[in-house]
Amino acid sequence: MTIAGKQRKVKELLRKNKAVLLVHYYQREEIQDIADYLGDSLGLSIEAAKTEAAVIVFAGVKFMAESAAILSPEKTVLLPRLEAGCPLADTITIGELDDMKKNHPGAAVVTYVNSTAEIKAASDICCTSANVDRVIRSIDRDAPIIMAPDGNLADYAARITGRNIIAWKGYCPVHHFLDPDDVQELKDRYPEAVFAAHPECRRVVLDLADYVGSTGGILKYVRTVDAEIVIVGTEMGIIHQLAKQNPGKTFVPASPSMICETMKYTTLDDIVVSLEEMRNVITVPEEMGAPARRALDRMLAVS
Ligand code: 13P
Ligand code: SF4
């Protein structure tokens, strides 16, 4: 079947099952193009919480589908490829977070949404890269703050808020290994270009950036910035939307290695099978779901 044929099939099954397709910007182009809602992690959480559809199909990675299941436990949440995980989310165990809490009694625990349901459940509030500033500022000035699992996001948050943050040193391999020398080389090759970077990159890379923000933030920035060439310091999947929204501009990936393998697992065929068989339902046990929901709801309230 052609790609267009598969896209039609997915649309038909979505209608039949009263389902919505939520898609992250790092997904394959042919899936982005048929999304009912396409967004960054924050936008996807908001949409998952408010949709009236009975079924949510998540084209993203597991923590995103889990967040949808936590926020809407009465809905059926499908993750077409169960093995589509996020290596960053797996960098901390509950035992390690418990140790941090023991070592820093009274600290508020802020968890990046790129985390497991178990870690969210042990947290006071969640954040995404789009709202980290507001989330940190919502915490009592005198309270120490533990942030997990992304050490680079924690470092960025500490810098923009001036707060002292005790960080878990997890990282996203796609962003962490972006080499500042590669970025500098591109900046030298395209002196008129701007460089937009995701806060999961290291400080040495963010120091070279004209803009730092979530995927949604980068899209907004590029729509308004007066530059014809943009060096893109995040996963390459976003370039599809950047190019669609800004036909006159040129986008240069900061590195050819910025591809998130697990974000690319999901195919149109997987979505068809998942919808036809109602297969790969994501659920979170309520004893974990309830405290995790509290942490996500607190985040949504300050967003
Ligand atoms: P955003 O929240 O910016 O969409 O990022 C999600 C993610 O997985 C970044 O690597
Ligand atoms: Fe996880 Fe990084 Fe992939 Fe985002 S890009 S899903 S943080 S591994």
Image (spheres, grey):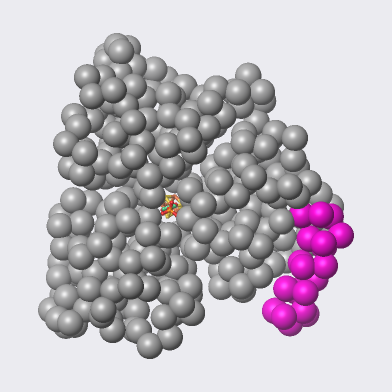
Instruction: In the displayed orientation, state which residue is furthest to the bottom.
Output: 248
Q: Nearer the viewer, residue 202 or 40?
A: 40
Residue at position x 38%, y 66% in the image: 220
Residue at position x 40%, y 33% in the image: 111
Image quadrant occupied by the C terminus: top left
In the image, residue 29 lies at what x, y percent?
56, 73
In the picture, measured across the screen, residue 300 lies left or right of residue 230, that is right
Residue at position x 46%, y 77% in the image: 245
Q: Indicate whether residue 9 is drawn in magenta.
A: yes
In the image, residue 81 lies at what x, y percent?
65, 53
In the image, residue 83 lies at what x, y percent?
60, 48
Q: Which residues are magenta?
A: 1-19
Q: Indicate whether residue 155 is drawn in magenta.
A: no
Residue at position x 31%, y 34% in the image: 136
**Residue 106 to residue 175: above or below:** above
Rendering quarter of residue 271? bottom right
